[in-house]
Amino acid sequence: MAGNNGPTCGKTAPSGAALFLLSPLLFAIALLVKLTSPGPVFYRAGRVGQGGRRFRLYKFRSMAADAAQSVISPGITGAGDSRITRVGRWLRRLKLDELPQLINVLRGEMSLVLSE
């Protein structure tokens, strides 16, 4: 049985450790998002993973909560897009809006890919 869990544990353990170590930062970002703009803390989007498995991708919300209703070009946001919040602009610049994807890695829906 231990052999069956090895590969999964090896893939998800780093994301679990990262979530634990980054939890104070994640909490601070969540608080900033919540206090500076109305709406949910997380942006959730449907994605299709390996083998056609559907899952929900998590990111910190960086745009106005009603941004989907005011879409000019679907899926495209420019640097000067007025729908991006002040905190969201900062999160995107530092790529911190992507940190909740560690939840997806922990759940086995995504893989952690590191550059060489």
Image (spheres, rainbow, N blue to C red):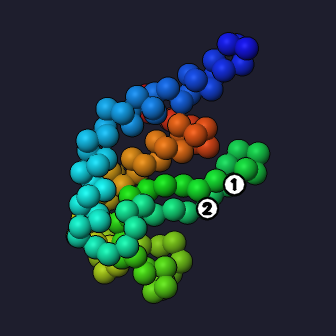
Residue appearing at x 36%, y 76% in the figure: 64
- Tell me: 110 left or right of 77: right
Which residue position holds label 1? 54
Residue type at tag 1: Arg
Name the quarter where the N terminus is drawn.
top right
What residue occupies the far top of the structure in this picture? 2
In this rendering, the answer to whether 61 lies above or below 56 is below
Residue appearing at x 61%, y 43% in the figure: 109
Q: Can residue 112 be seen in this snapshot?
A: yes
Q: Looking at the image, tell me whether mark 1 or mark 2 is earlier in sequence order.
A: 2
Which residue position holds label 2? 46
Residue 42 is marked as none
Q: Residues within 10 Å of mark 2 (few under 14, many from 20)?
A: few
Q: Secondary structure at mark 2?
A: strand
Q: Position of residue 11 (x, y in %)?
A: 56, 28
Q: Position of residue 94 (x, y in %)?
A: 27, 52
Q: Secondary structure at mark 1?
A: strand
